[in-house]
Amino acid sequence: MESTASTEDFRVRSAAEKRERMHARLIAATMEAYLQAPAGFHPVIDDVIRVADVSRGTFYKYFDSLDEVRAKIGRSMAGEMLSSYEALFAGIEDYAVRMAAGPLMALARAAMEPRHAAFISRVDFIEFLDGEDPRSVIVKRGLEEGRQRGQVQFESLEAAVDLVVGVSLEGARRILQTGALDGAYIRETATLVMLGLGLSRPEAKAAVTAAWEHLQKVSGRLHWWRPVGGI
């Protein structure tokens, strides 16, 4: 009896592991399909199953639609980005430095992981960053606390969030399309965001420099960090 039970447990575990592997394979294929898609176009299911080398029927065993895959990837990416940002910069008391870190992380990752850039630059990523996940308040909270301390200036919190996130996404799109793996471009883009939040240019450059130095110091904790192109 014990042998039969052990065999059954093994089969259940094996089946579960097989499902997990195929699930991950389809998600990876979707991200690769986004990277391969021409600028301005979104991949379709045929693109995903071609990359994954599976049948359409196999795809539908795991997902009802490509929108479901996109939503899963988007939520996962947003959650990971926000968690990493919080873990690496929560201890920094200067809120200007903390705000500069967001665009720096997003743009550095776009340069180092093109598949990530291909996805976030082609979907409504703000929807995932501003969703129901409790971590979605991290950006808003940081901006609001920075304003209360007088370290950043703005009237509309929503406009400030759109500035930070929107410029980051557009920068990621440019990096993806041009292959401009340029640390100077990344730092200047973050500096312009800080100017938009009311800092003077010397203050903005100082905040970006401090955030960049800290990011490089803790980069070993980021699985995607792969220095390229002078970054």
Image (spheres, rainbow, N blue to C red):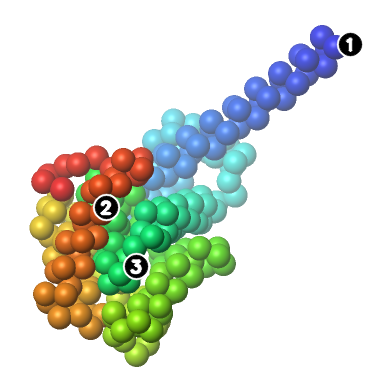
Q: Nearer the viewer, mark 3 or mark 1?
A: 3
Q: Residue at x 54, y 32 (%)?
A: 22
Q: Is residue 53 above or below residue 80?
A: above
Foreground pick, 112 / 217: 217
Which residue does the numbered mark 2 point to in the structure image?
A: 215
- Among the two numbered marks 3 and 1 on one chain, the one whose residue lies closer to the N terminus: 1
Say if mark 2 contacts mark 3, CB within 8 Å. Answer: no
For residue 159, above or below residue 61: below
Q: Assess disc 1: are there few (<14), some (14-19) or many (≥20) residues with their C-alpha within 10 Å of its C-alpha.
A: few
Residue behind mark 1: 1
**Secondary element at tag 3:** loop
**Among the two numbered marks 2 and 3 on one chain, the one whose residue lies closer to the N terminus:** 3
* Residue drawn at point x = 30 percent, y = 57 percent: 106
Question: Would you call the spot at circle 2 few (<14 residues within 10 Å), some (14-19), or many (20 or more)?
Answer: many
Residue 128 lies, in percent from the top left, at 47, 63
**Which amino acid type corresponds to the residue marked 1 in the rendered image?**
Met
Tell me residue 212's x, y (percent). 21, 56
Can residue 8 be seen here? The reply is yes
Asked whether 31 or 230 is in front, the reply is 230
Mark-to-mark CA distance, 3 and 1 = 61 Å
Locate the N terminus by quadrant.
top right
Say which element carries label 1. Answer: loop
Q: What is the C-alpha distance between the residues marked 2 and 1?
A: 56 Å
Q: Which residue is mark 3?
A: 93
Q: Are marks 2 and 1 in contact (CB under 8 Å)?
A: no
* Residue at the outermost right position: 1
Specify the quadrant of the image occupied by residue 5. top right
